[in-house]
Amino acid sequence: MTKSTPFGSLEQPFNPLSLALGAEATFVARTHDMDRKHMMETFRRAHQHKGASFVEIYQNCNVFNDGAFAQITGKDNRANMLIPLAHGEPIRFGAEGEHGVVLHPNGSLEVVSVADVGESALLVHDEHQDSRAWPSS
């Protein structure tokens, strides 16, 4: 509840990244205000991109929602909650890169232990892949 919405928001929340992808934006990213270097690099790349760009920022507001994103961006949680993507690199995360993402033949994704499956089984991030379709392998 705020001064502009004294009875709370009546609308159901939606995922802005899904909306951007559905509108066929060709550069879609998310960043947070606790990592200035990543945020600046994301803005630079969005600005240089030829086409529609959309950047969602998780930003803390000390007045209305202080700590709202702490479970994701807090120093104790960050390594296990944020998945950094680098073009041409396997999707790994965790303090020691111990977690990864695999793509199953049915198109589903799964978070796995890299030690269990090996790095060669991990999905490789391809920023040029058409966002409307998964890679065939």
Image (cartoon, helix red, strand yellow):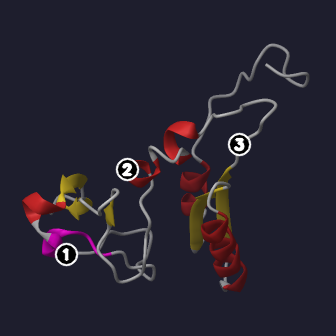
The kind of residue on which mark 2 rests is Asn
Q: Would residue 52 be seen by someone viewing this image from the given angle?
A: no
| Residue 71 pos. (x, y %) | 50, 37
Q: Are marks 1 and 3 in contact (CB under 8 Å)?
A: no
Q: Earlier in the sequence, mark 1 or mark 3?
A: 3
Q: Looking at numbered disc 1 in the image, what kind of residue is underneath it?
A: Ser
Q: Is label 2 in contact with label 1 (beta carbons under 8 Å)?
A: no
Q: Residue at x 17, y 72 (%)?
A: 119
Query: Residue 54 falls in which quadrant of the image?
Result: bottom right
Q: Position of residue 9 (x, y in %)?
A: 74, 23
For the magenta stretch, what is the residue range? 119-124
Residue where numbered disc 2 is placed: 80
Q: Quadrant of residue 21?
A: bottom right
On screen, residue 61 above or below 9? below
> Is 120 within the magenta?
yes
Q: Of label 2 and label 1, which has the lower sequence position?
A: 2
The label number, if any, that marks residue 95 in the structure image:
none
Q: Residue at x 91, y 21 (%)?
A: 3
Q: Secondary structure at mark 3?
A: loop
In percent of width and height, residue 117 lies at 9, 63
* Crowd tier of the residue under label 1, counting other residues whose Cα lies within 10 Å: few below 14, some 14–19, many 20 or above: few
Identify the residue at horizontal 22%, vertical 75% (top origin): 136
- Residue 132 horizontal/vertical position (percent): 43, 68
Magenta run includes residue 22: no
Dots 2, 3 in contact, CB < 8 A: no
User: Which dot marks residue 137?
Assistant: 1
Q: Amino acid at mark 3?
A: Asn
Out of 112 and 54, give the one closest to the viewer: 112
